[in-house]
Amino acid sequence: MPIIAHTDGWILQTQTTAYALGFDSDGRLVNRWWGVRLPYPEDYPAPPDSDGYASFNGPAHLLPEEYPAYADGLNYTEPCLKLTYPDEVRAVILKLEDSTHSDDTLILTLTDPAYPALHVMLYYTLHAQTDIIARRAVITNTGNVPITLERVWSALWYIPQDGLNFRHFTGRWNDEFILREETLTHGVKTIESRRLTTSHHHNPYFALHRDATEDSGDVWFGLLAWSGNWSIRAEVTDFGGVRLGVGVNDWDFAYQLNAGESFRTPTAYAGYTQGGFSAASRNLHACLRGTLPHAGQPRKVLFNSWEVSEFDVNEASQKGFAQAAAAIGCELFVMDDGWFNGRDSDSAGLGDWWPDARKFPDGLTPLVTHVNALGMDFGLWIEPEMVNPASDLYRKHPDWVIHHPNRPRTQARNQLILNLARTDVQEYLITALDKLLTQHNIAFIKWDMNRNVSEAGWPDAPGHPRELWVRYVDGLYHVWGTLRQRHPGVLWQSCSGGGGRADWGILRYADQIWLSDNTDPTRRLPMQANFSHVFPPETLESWVTDMGADYLPLAFRYHVSMCGVLGVGADITRWSDKQRDQARQLTEAYKAVRDVIQFGDVFRLVQTDPYYAMQYLDATAENGVLFVFRTYAPEPTAPMRVRLRGLQPDRLYRVEDHAVVRSGAAWMADGLTVVLGNFESRLLKLTAT
Ligand code: GLA
């Protein structure tokens, strides 16, 4: 049984892990265990109890409360829930009222006996096969006077070890997914977004460990599936316990919960493994693959026009690129920015989502037909959440943007943000984009968002204006979800100036993510490997562009992009016949192994500059792909030693280019030596004999 209820509370069991909770003597819901699964229910520690410490810290401060509210007694740690009752009381005391569970979900209902209108439902859903637990909360006002919410986290996780290192990813536009790691010390460490989008600067992902490596060691890891402001807060208390809160950011946040209304938090996913970072990411991949909209559908090799044409697109030029793209094996032709009304630069057009008659006198249909006749699907770029002041839409609806009255409307890239919290804006976008998708044979949409928020006001908000942060994201999900439902065959890419919206929340709507506008392959190597901690390869779109062409061979650039969903964004019409021929062969080689790459297990074998090695292995462990790269290092440099992973120890395997057939155990323990020159790379197939 995955969920065991007994006198001490509940034990939630996944394949190899367990999470146990229960009650202290005052009825507080407390954590008992998060770690390896133990043989017997009696093995798990009893719920901790405490009388407090001196007169300065009460029991609630010392106990690992599952969902602490502010402020229950002498407690100064970070709470999950902060609110103000209609009578201005801000102290909340939660007691269990009800519990129920199915095979995979435990639902606990907590209430505040003095304020029975408040219902807090905690959901624990087990993804047992992948050792992942998903937590979320639903707060309901069953009374008839509004309650003001000020913080509602999705989960608080307790890590039963101290001296922990905190791993996370930071970055900025054009430089995403830099791996950071620091030892947690007393106090609070926060990573967050305050920008309305998710992830240029920090990704809503964490991993905590003491001395784990890629292959071994205890790791507690997780993320928040949300595409707006979020925070992850790791706190080491005065008694040394480590707790980590995950949720919508409470920075500038308030939410008026009216009579009968519920607030649903996004889901926080987390897991524990003894297998190091590699196992942690494979568990996340397997879990996400269970919910991806087009799970298991091979992603097509695409061509994208942006770095080639920028805003200068028209029917004739794009037909030319389509011809060239088809000839090198592309299967999907995506026209990026520049195609819609009035769009010659970034200073006009956003909001007016119909083809520019100067560039496409007969609409998009002739181009789409041409692309389809070449045997490719057609895709299109849009940036629905934005408006240029120089657009019909803004001239008609200047009040539709996020703004404060009497304050400047700060433009970034000459654009303002439509307030997607507004239902009229949502309806406009659904109608305009539905028309676009209905009138054309569009198989793929790249959904972009190219600025961060400023002057985050919502005049005439029906509730609290600070609900904007959450209602905007709900509106985004509503628009995207409606379009998805009406056009189920379309695949979508999430882009926000590169990796500004790389999160599991958007992956309920999007199929692929544009990791970064930085397409230089040597920069992409670590970036892509770091991305793979959180996301599986079928979500990673990666183009071969002209960046790096001055110092890297074409094969190197292709091999980097093959470590995900291969795309091309280079001016292929300027490539020589020889280069185009090579590109076609490399694309064929990719297609031959793409199922293994896109749906396989991922192993980051080597990540020490100048050497990088990535391995992909199918579910049967019979077919694998190994990519090896050397960037630049002056000679003499020792060759790269690669030890393979995930093979069946007793089976015999062949590694392409190597004469010997050896056991999986030998390839994993001894491995192979790869001799590469500067800026060389190789794709090597692994095959069980
Ligand atoms: C963003 C994207 C690019 C491209 C441009 C178009 O920067 O990340 O890939 O689509 O917008 O304006």
Image (cartoon, rainbow, N blue to C red):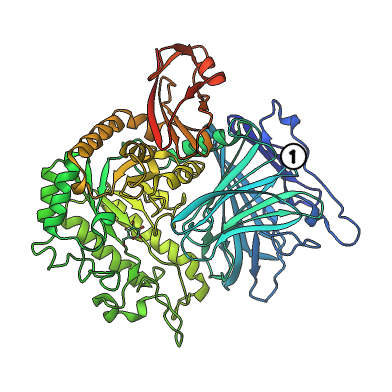
Q: Check the image and report above or below for 89 versus 497.
A: below
Q: Nearer the viewer, residue 603 or 424?
A: 603
Tell me the quarter of the image containing the C terminus: top left
The x and y percentages for residue 665 are 54, 16
Please tell me in which quarter of the rendered image ligand 1 is found. Answer: bottom left
Please give left or right for residue 254 compared with residue 111 in the image: left
- Residue at the spot of label 1: 8
Q: State the image quarter where residue 681 is shown.
A: top left
- Please tell me which residue is depicted at 86% across the width and 55% down the height of the picture: 52
Report crowding for label 1: few under 14, some 14 to 19, many 20 or more residues within 10 A (C-alpha). some
Q: In the displayed structure, would residue 305 be above or below residue 73?
A: above
Image spot of residue 206 (x, y percent): 59, 48
Residue at 24% across / 65% down in the picture? 432
Of all residues, the one furthest to the right in this rendering is: 54
| Residue under the point 64% across and 54% down | 245
Can residue 193 be seen from the camera position used here?
A: yes
38 horizontally vs 341: left or right: right
* Residue 256: quadrant of the picture: bottom right
Q: Is residue 11 visible?
A: no
Q: Nearer the viewer, residue 679 or 219?
A: 679
Estimate the x, y position of residue 1 in percent, counting from the top left: 60, 30
Looking at the image, the residue that sits furthest to the front is 635
Residue type, mark 1 in image: Asp
Q: Secondary structure at mark 1?
A: loop
Query: Which residue is at the far bottom?
Result: 406
Image-quadrant location for residue 413: bottom left
User: In this image, 254 relative to 71: left or right?
Assistant: left
Up the image or down, 277 lies above or below 191; here it is: above
